[in-house]
Each structure stands twice: as structure tokens, then as C-alpha cells.
Image: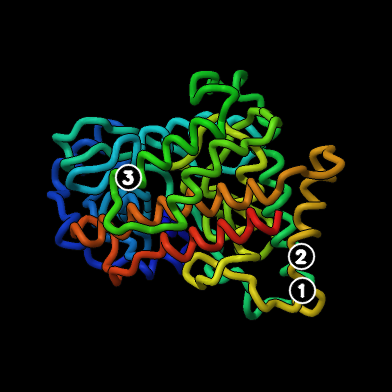
């Protein structure tokens, strides 16, 4: 998934006109924000970030009395939605809770669950300055910079997994334990709900995965879509200032996030991110084994058993998500204009290859 929930100054230039399918009257929104956001004032301008295929995301800029203030609004898309998808209320809740931890998140302003304001639930947070790296290969950077950026991505992931979810009020954010059993069931259901074709490899995964779940049942906060494009770095330093796009977060398993990070090493999609063909020694980007070893070192693990399963599961889940995106494009409800290509089939094949290697 490629979603944007905050942006640096240069990213603001990527905000354009609001798509017809996502257009709403800004006047009720302006009135709502005046009443619910401290310091909100001035005339409101609404523009839309054009990237992404999930929850439509907008740049809000105030002019006049509140000149220069910028916010980001994220809303559910219009139309009929799959069950449990596009959970902007969960995104808001977890970022609000993590604001008291050492996991960097944007400042949350307000959650509105009243469809009457702009047609769907939404939340608003502060616009944040920084850098979003859209290419996994980090072109234009020095090897030492690339190494530091990936090391920071790894470090912040381990900090998230170390958060005491009970202490920050997220004890009911998901069900502790049996994560993979529940997730496999969920993504089978999501896939069936958006299915448009018969994909034999998806059927093989649907049969295999529930029968080969590893015994490790660790519980932590799992981001669900943690990768380079979904974090924001400081404008000049290799330091993450905001972890973004929490739509898929839950109480889950740490190795699901780690394996999802490692899809980059197997992905063939530059849109999602791919490190295939990279000369790791020359570029400074860590190899997959080095990246996994850094995670193990930080979390006190000697090694990871059944990594092929974790990779296979992560790619299967991404295949199910891709099927949903494809269906939304066909239905005209995606949050950006996109070519109707179903990536689920190739992702399923990559998932099966990972399982066989493992």
C-alpha cells in the first residue's frame, strides 16, 4: 500500500485539486475545526495528496487570521467498503496513544465520526516537516547515509515493538495471542470479498498457511504497513520524526512487521519498493540477512525460526490488500487514479516461493 498521512514542505507541492469522487463542501469542515481544534482560524483551503489507494488524504491550509497553519486530514473513501477496512478511527487512536512514548508520531488534533460533516469519518493532525523517501534504493544519497537511514528504520521498529501496550491504554486494541490464525482468516475473508478472478496460487496459500503457523506467540503493537515510504525523516538528519499510515495496526506479532520490511528484498514492484539487484556493499543498504540480524541484536533474539512462513504470510496479506485495491479501482473508489492491474497473482507467487525457500 502507498498512503500518505503527513508531508514535508516539498511534499506539499504534491497536493493538487480534490478528485471529483472525494469532493466535499469545505464550509462545514471549517466550522467544525473552528469548534474543535485549538487555534484554528482563517479561511480554509483544501487540496488532496494524489498518491495512495486507500484512505484519501488532504492538505488543509488556513489563510487570513490563521495564515500559514497547515494540517493533514485523512478520511474514509466513499462507497461500499470491505468490513474492518479504512479504519481511520484506529489510526487516530493509536497515534494519539503513542504520543506519550518514544515512537515518533504526528500530533493528533481531532477525530470526527459524524458522517454529516464531510460525508465520512475523518481525523485531523498537524502537518509535519521532513523527508519521505519513495524509492527503497535511496538514489542521490551517500552509502553512509543509506546505511544510517535503514538502521534508523530498524531501530524505530524495535522501539514500537517494545511499547507496553497496556500502559498506553491499548490493551483492547486487538486480541493478544493467535495473531497469525486470526490474520490469515481475516485476509482470506478480505480476499474473498474483493475476488475478481480465480488465482490458483492464492488458493494454495489459503490452504497452506493456516496449517503451518509457528509456535512463537509473542504479542506487541504491530504497525502492519511499516516500511520506508510510511515513515518521515528529519529534513537533514537520518532520524525518523513520524511513523505514518497506521490503518492496519493492531496487537500482533513483531515478526510480521519484520518480514513485511523484508518484502523489499523480494519485491519486483518499484511502486511498493524493491531492492532486487542492489549491490549492498557498494550502496550502503543492508542485505536482508544484515537487516534481520540488526533486529535480532536489538531485541535479544538469537535467530528467527520459520522466517519463510513469516515472509510468505506477509506477501499473502499484501496480495489480499492488492486484490482489494484492484477491486476499488474497478469500482471507481480508489483514492488516486490508477491503472487497473491486479498485482495479487504475482504477489501470491512470490509468497509461495518464499515458503518453499524457507
Q: Is residue 52 above or below residue 42?
A: below
Residue 59 is at least partly visible in this image: no
Q: Earlier in the sequence, mark 1 or mark 3?
A: 3
* Disc 3, SS: helix
Q: Residue at x 32, y 45 (%)?
A: 192
Q: Where residue 228 appears, x then y in whole percent?
A: 59, 59
* Disc 2, SS: loop
Q: Where residue 229 appears, x then y in whole percent?
A: 53, 60
Q: Is residue 204 above or below residue 11?
A: above
- Please name the residue that numbered disc 3 is placed on: 192
Residue 89 is at least partly visible in this image: yes
Which of discs 2 and 3 lies nearer the camera? The answer is: 3
Q: Residue at x 55, y 42 (%)?
A: 209
Q: Which mark is residue 286?
A: 2
Quadrant of residue 214 in the image?
Answer: top right
Position of the N terminus, as image quadrant, is bottom left
Q: Are marks 1 and 2 in contact (CB under 8 Å)?
A: yes
Q: Residue at x 24, y 43 (%)?
A: 81
Q: Residue at x 28, y 68 (%)?
A: 340
What is the C-alpha distance between the residues marked 2 and 3?
37 Å
- Please name the residue that numbered disc 1 is placed on: 280
Q: Are marks 1 and 3 in contact (CB under 8 Å)?
A: no
Q: Where residue 72 appears, x then y in whole percent?
A: 37, 50
Task: Report crowding for label 1: few under 14, some 14 to 19, many 20 or more residues within 10 A (C-alpha).
Answer: some
Q: Earlier in the sequence, mark 2 or mark 3?
A: 3
Amino acid at each position: 500500500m502507498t498512503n500518505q498521512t503527513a508531508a514535508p514542505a516539498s511534499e506539499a507541492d504534491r497536493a493538487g485539486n480534490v478528485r471529483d469522487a472525494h469532493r466535499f463542501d469545505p464550509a462545514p469542515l471549517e466550522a467544525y475545526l473552528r469548534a474543535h481544534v485549538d487555534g484554528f482560524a482563517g479561511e480554509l483551503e483544501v487540496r488532496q495528496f494524489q498518491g495512495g489507494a486507500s484512505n484519501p488524504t488532504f492538505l488543509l491550509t488556513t489563510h487570513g487570521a490563521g495564515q500559514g497553519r497547515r494540517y493533514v486530514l485523512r478520511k474514509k473513501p466513499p462507497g461500499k467498503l470491505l468490513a474492518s477496512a479504512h479504519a481511520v478511527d484506529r489510526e487516530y487512536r493509536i497515534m494519539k496513544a503513542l504520543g506519550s512514548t518514544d515512537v515518533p508520531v504526528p500530533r493528533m488534533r481531532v477525530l470526527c465520526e459524524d458522517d454529516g460533516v464531510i460525508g465520512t469519518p475523518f481525523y485531523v493532525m498537524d502537518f509535519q516537516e521532513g523527508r519521505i523517501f519513495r524509492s527503497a534504493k535511496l538514489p542521490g544519497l551517500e552509502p553512509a547515509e543509506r546505511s544510517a537511514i535503514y538502521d534508523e528504520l530498524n531501530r524505530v521498529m524495535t522501539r514500537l515493538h517494545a511499547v507496553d501496550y497496556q500502559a498506553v491504554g491499548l490493551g483492547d486494541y486487538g486480541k493478544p495471542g493467535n495473531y497469525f490464525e486470526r490474520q490469515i482468516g481475516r485476509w482470506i475473508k478480505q480476499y474473498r470479498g474483493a475476488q475478481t478472478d480465480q488465482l490458483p496460487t492464492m488458493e494454495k496459500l489459503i490452504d497452506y498457511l493456516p496449517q503451518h503457523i509457528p509456535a512463537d506467540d509473542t504479542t506487541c503493537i504491530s504497525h502492519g504497513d511499516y516500511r520506508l515510504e510510511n515513515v518521515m525523516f528529519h529534513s537533514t538528519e537520518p532520524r525518523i520524526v513520524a511513523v505514518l499510515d497506521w490503518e492496519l495496526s493492531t496487537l500482533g506479532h513483531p515478526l510480521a512487521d519484520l518480514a513485511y520490511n523484508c518484502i523489499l528484498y523480494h519485491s519486483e514492484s518499484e511502486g511498493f519498493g524493491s531492492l532486487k539487484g542492489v549491490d549492498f556493499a557498494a550502496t550502503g543498504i543492508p542485505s536482508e540477512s544484515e537487516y534481520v540480524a540488526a533486529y535480532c541484536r536489538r531485541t535479544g533474539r538469537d535467530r528467527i525460526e520459520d522466517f519463510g512462513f513469516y515472509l510468505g504470510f506477509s506477501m499473502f496479506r499484501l496480495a489480499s490488500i492488492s486484490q482489494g485495491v484492484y477491486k476499488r479501482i474497478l469500482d471507481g473508489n480508489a483514492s488516486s487514479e490508477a491503472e487497473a492491474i491486479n498485482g495479487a497473482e504475482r504477489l501470491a507467487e512470490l509468497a509461495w516461493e518464499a515458503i518453499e525457500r524457507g
